[in-house]
Image (tube, rainbow, N blue to C red):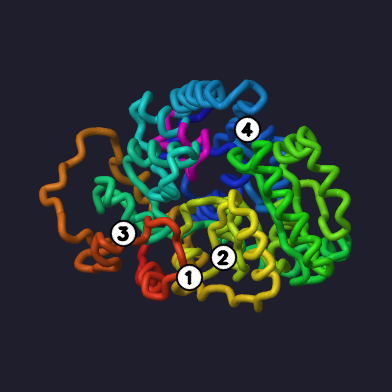
Amino acid sequence: MNIIENFIMIVAGTRPEAIKLAPVLWWLDKLGVEYTFIWSGQHYDYEMSSIFFEQLNLPAPDEYLNVGSQAQDLASQVAILIQKIVDAIKRWKPKFVYALGDTNTTLASALASVYTSEPFVHDEAGMRSYDTSMIEEMNRRICDSVANFRLAPTKIAFLNLLNEGALPDDIRLVGSTIVDVLLYITSSENIIKNTLLTNLNLEPLQYTLVTIHRRENLTESQLRKIVDVLTTVANFTPDHTFVMPVHPHTQKNLNAYGLYKLLEKYSNIKLIKPLGYIEFITLLKNSKVVITDSGGVQEEAFILGKRILTLRKTTEWIETVLLGYNKLLDIDNAQSVISEVVNAINSPVLKPPELSTSPIGDGNAGKRVATILQRLAETKLERGISPSLIEKHSDKIFLCLQKNRKLLQEDNTFRRLTRIPLAPDPELAELVKVDWSQINE
């Protein structure tokens, strides 16, 4: 194995990570930045994830750790991941480790970097739902706490990091790379799978897309409530279709509780197998409403201008709520959820947000991230003692992205943004927007 100077180790292992990493890898290749791509295999195995690599022109991993087939539970998965990533770091000796998101692979990458004394760069830093019952929430908090450099997708994420004590010089606002991927897919009619709607006998804007996979929604009691909502609304709206790509874990539990066959009885509820990413985006792009519990789908649906009904009490993508695209719904109040679904179906379509000021990105995040990684590889990023905050701003916390530029207001705004329940707020919606033309790499 040839050791290359100043190269980056990029670690991922789930399909959402592969999708979001694609623009970063595209730009690293364009810039000629050397990197090693480690694939943990946390999500099933490489063969099942390979369609995402093919569809998004991703390079084959330099190493495949095959962790998914070895772990018996989440704890053993993290333990195996840490050891395997530690071993990979020792073999490759990178300048630093880069990982994205809030998965167990990301967590293990962060901790492996600590145990090998290598610097760690965390992308999607600062995302917070403030729900500590979510494993993903704890993963991203730990990753941010041990990171040497943090890439924030939104203003709110940037402010979260400052509020937790991160130094402004160790954070950059970059946007979410999912916007880059969506633009890549939707800009070419050769990529979008328009025949998919014909094959499923669907008409544009005449169906709701449903995705349910979070473990807190897969208990018997929660699944029964969700199925009751879907079947009730299906009865109320016989001319409207509900399309549900069924996650393997979701299907397993639906079958175990006798709910899959119940859903199959409804002619306007279509249960389909999980799709490739481009096929999924085709369905999302042509849907009228989206019901989900996924953080990534909230992002995607927002950029495509969809009405989103999120079956969660909190969200890390607060901006989608503030701008009026997303509603958080408590499935424990099923009657209210039913009313919201029916209202969304009968409401006019929304326009997609303006990308030049979109709060979650403008489609250039991959370039920003790759350029920052290139610069970090050329400098001396290392673990060690960080300077303390000389002055604590107790009255006001300003989001400083460049010298003498203040882009978000004082800390009482921060407190308002974390309140529950969230609701559309025109004033705060303007605050969280970003003039991306002013954001340099």
Task: Identify the mark at residue 220; answer none if there is no mark.
Answer: none
Does residue 228 sit above or below 287 in this rendering? above
Q: How far apart are the alpha carbons under marks 3 and 1? A: 16 Å
Q: Can residue 430 be seen at all in this image of the molecule?
A: yes
**Depth-wise, is mark 1 or mark 4 nearer the camera?**
1
Q: Which residue is drawn at 60% across and 51% down?
A: 331
Q: Which amino acid does label 2 sit on?
A: Phe
Q: Which residue is drawn at 66% across and 53% down?
A: 56
Residue annotated with mark 1? 323
Q: In the rendered structure, which disc, 3 or 2, sits on the residue that comes first in sequence?
A: 2
Residue annotated with mark 3? 414
Q: Residue at x 31, y 56 (%)?
A: 159
Q: Which amino acid does label 4 sit on?
A: Gly
Q: Magenta part of the protein: which range?
A: 93-107
Q: In the rendered structure, which disc, 3 or 1, sits on the residue that comes first in sequence?
A: 1
- Name the secondary structure under disc 4: loop
Residue annotated with mark 2? 302
User: Furthest residue to the left?
Assistant: 390
Does residue 362 sit above or below 242 in this rendering? below
Residue 289: horizontal and vertical position, in percent? 67, 66
- Name the secondary structure under disc 2: helix
Task: Identify the mark at residue 41; answer none if there is no mark.
Answer: 4
**Depth-wise, is mark 4 or mark 2 nearer the camera?**
2
Q: How far apart are the alpha carbons under marks 4 and 2? A: 29 Å
Residue 105 is inside the magenta segment: yes
Residue 354: horizontal and vertical position, in percent? 51, 75
Q: In the rendered structure, which disc, 1 or 2, sits on the residue that comes first in sequence?
A: 2
**Depth-wise, is mark 1 or mark 2 nearer the camera?**
1
Query: Which residue occupies the foreground of this view, 36 or 79?
Result: 79
- Name the secondary structure under disc 3: helix
Q: In the rendered structure, which disc, 1 or 4, sits on the residue that comes first in sequence?
A: 4
Query: Which residue occupies the foreground of this view, 284 or 25?
Result: 284
